[in-house]
Image (tube, grey):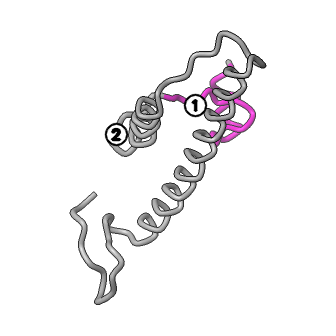
Amino acid sequence: MKRASKRGGGGEQLFFDDPAVDGLMGVVMALATEHYVLRDRLRLLEEQLARSGHIHGAEFPSPQEDAEAFTAELLRPLLGIQESVSAGGRFSLKSKSNRRRSKR
């Protein structure tokens, strides 16, 4: 990743060496924004259901705590922190021959 710079003479910023990566990151961030809006609306509905007695024993983080946790998890891969490892299951990108060898 490099410092933000202006592309050509336009107003669009370039953060990565490849403009396609910038475009992809724009899509990811737009989807993340929509996801967070839905998550926040769900939290509000759950809080209303708890207040009205329809659900019991539910504890909800504050909106600030939830936003901070969501942002940290969203940015974790960009900071180079990746925790998941492929299990090589049915939908794995590994080739079938590699999966057969690993099962033996």
- The type of residue carrying mark 2 is Gly
Q: Which mark is residue 2?
A: none
Name the side, left or right, on which 92 lies relative to 63.
right
| Circles 1 and 2 in contact, beta carbons < 8 Å | no
Q: Quadrant of the N terminus?
A: bottom left
Q: Where is residue 72 shown, x and y percent of the image?
A: 39, 36
In the depicted view, which residue is nearer to us: 85 or 81?
81
**Residue 10 at what x, y percent from top left?**
33, 86
Task: Identify which residue, 33 or 85, lies in the foreground.
Answer: 33
Q: Amino acid at mark 1?
A: Ser
The C terminus is located in which quarter? top right
Q: How many marks?
A: 2
Q: Residue at x 29, y 89 (%)?
A: 9
Indicate which disc, 1 or 2, sits on the residue closer to the N terminus.
2
65 lies left or right of 2: right
Which of 31 and 40 lies nearest the eye of the viewer? 40
Depth order, front residue of 20/97: 20
Instruction: Give above or below for 62 relative to 104.
Output: below
Q: Residue 80: give its label.
A: 2
User: Which stretch is magenta?
Assistant: 84-103
Identify the residue shown where x is 53% and y is 61%: 27
**Where is residue 84 shown, x and y percent of the image?**
51, 29
Q: Residues within 10 Å of mark 1 (few under 14, many from 20)?
A: few
Res 96 → quadrant:
top right
Q: Secondary structure at mark 1?
A: loop
